[in-house]
Image: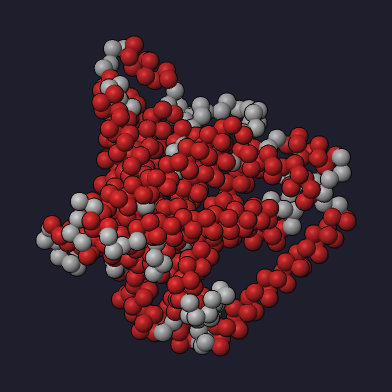
Amino acid sequence: MSSVLYDTPGPRAKRRNLLYSVVFLLLLALLLWWVWGVLSDKGQLDWVKWSPFFTQSLSWTTYLLPGLGNTLKAAALSMVIALPLGAFFGIARLSDHRWVRVPAAVVVEFFRAIPVLLLMVFANQLYSESTDISSDSRPLYAVVTGLVLYNASVLAEVVRAGILALPKGQTEAAQAIGLRKGQTMVSILLPQAVTTMLPAIVSQLVVIVKDTALGGAILGFPELLDARKTLAANYANVIPSFIIVALVFIVLNLLLTTLASWLEGRLRRSKRSTGAVLGADAVTELNAVGEAQDALPRPPRTGKVP
Amino acid sequence: MFDFLEGYDVLGAFWTTVQLTFFAAIGSLIWGTILAGMRVSPVPLMRAFGTVYVNVFRNIPLTVIIVFTSLGLADVFGVTMGVPSDFKALAFRLAVLGLIVYTSAFVCESLRAGINTVPVGQAEAARAIGLSFTQVLTLIVLPQAFRTVIGPLANVLIALTKNTTVAAAIGVGEAALLMKEMIENEAQLLLISLVFALGFVVLTLPTGLILGWLGKRLAVKR
């Protein structure tokens, strides 16, 4: 493979690359050898510690799958509740009236600037002090509340960016046929923006799934990471259980990422859309505060690639 | 009204947050740059390593990584990070390590996106005057790439500042842990939470504004 940074390697470069490969491989092997040594010293490589995952379905059905189920439940609930809230605030930020626009902006920027853990801890304490939600289901409520507050504000930015990414002609044409502002938003802009935003929304799901683990570590929400703890306490398999849980997270999130980029590519190629797409990379930027303007997509490229 | 602050070291907790952010930022900038170099290098094995690293650590929750540094690295592998008997310092250093491992994947991706914005002609011209791959990367491409990605890197830094709260999971005494302790012991839930929330707004907002401004000023105009 040739790249911008280097030519197709000639005989000398090939020999040099081979040398680098060998040195790098040796370093990796050294590291692996150390890890392997420690693990076999501590007995973490014994089949007894691994067999629960491969031969007994018990470790999956009693620990990991319910944990994964709770992870997915919290993530799905948060997304479903956060989407309409985010749409509300995103549209409010685009309002022509200052008294609507400014408060919405303050709320969105405030919740985006705060770590999601703070919101979860706050919600947990709030529910324990002033509601009678049972202590069993309180972590779920707290985790979902924290995730909703944070992600609604991120999604508000996604919605705003999605609407701003649409070509100006859409609004102008709607106004030309006499639609009011509300009608333009509801029947022209929002339906198109939803397709534009789809990849970004799916990518945000990855962030949500990863953040549910916080609830497990701090609030005792019985999700995948928390399930690992009980599992490892039973089988004394710290390292194998971590590896399996990490793998589950990686596979789940890679699937979501693949879905997001598939959607992105499909929308970019589609002839019926306006060509404006809010990609997955916009999401990483929108999860931070301050420079929201940079994340807003530029007008769609027309063939010429720099 | 603010007498609940007595007896708690709120500023100290936020100082720990700042320290976590600082050390993790330096570490992940260095490791992330090395990773980005690997991802664009002509050696296939290094490229593969970079790709696998990024895809693995971007998709594992930070919480899992940080908890692993304590239960896995410290307890099973016996990693002491140079402080064998000081548990507080050990937790702090493990948290920094976990944050570096996670954040550098994002730094690497931002940098790689920046490298892609450097025009082909720059690298071609550099090769034409006989520079090697390392020289092309460090003298020509990376300096331009860094200037382009100040904005995205600022976003990574802000996300990192917020992510330091995850260190509470292994008992590092930073802001989130102190807040949890305070709202459980004191009666002023709303006020305490507001103090901590504002603390983070104060930490993250200037970072975004200053670096965003800097990024616009230093961006290579094309």
Instruction: Give the side of residue A28 with respect to residue A81, left or right.
Output: right
Left or right: B161, with A229 as reference point: right
What residue is at 41 percent from the left and 70 percent from the top?
B170
Horizontally, is B216 left or right of B86 in the view? right
Looking at the image, what colour scheme do you see? Answer: secondary structure
* Residue B165 in sight in this render: no
Residue closest to the far left: A132
Measured as percent of width and height from the top left, residue A180 is found at 26, 17
Q: Residue B201 location, x and y as percent?
A: 37, 45
The quadrant holding residue A213 is bottom left
The answer, for residue A219, to whether it is visible in the render is yes
Of residue B112 and residue A58, the one placed in the foreground of this image is B112
Residue B189 as seen in the image, left or right of residue A2: left
- Residue plotted at (57% across, 26% down): A302
Tell me what residue is drawn at x 33 percent, y 27 percent.
A94
Indicate whether A141 appears above or below A266: below
The quadrant the C terminus of chain B occupies is top right
Question: Quick check: B79 above or below A76?
Answer: below
Coordinates of residue A123 in the picture (x, y in percent): 24, 55
Q: How many marks?
A: 0
Front residue of B209/B121: it is B209
Within the image, what quadrant is residue A35 found in? Answer: bottom right
Residue placed at 78% from the left, 63% from the top?
Answer: A20
Percent of width and height locating residue A11:
88, 55
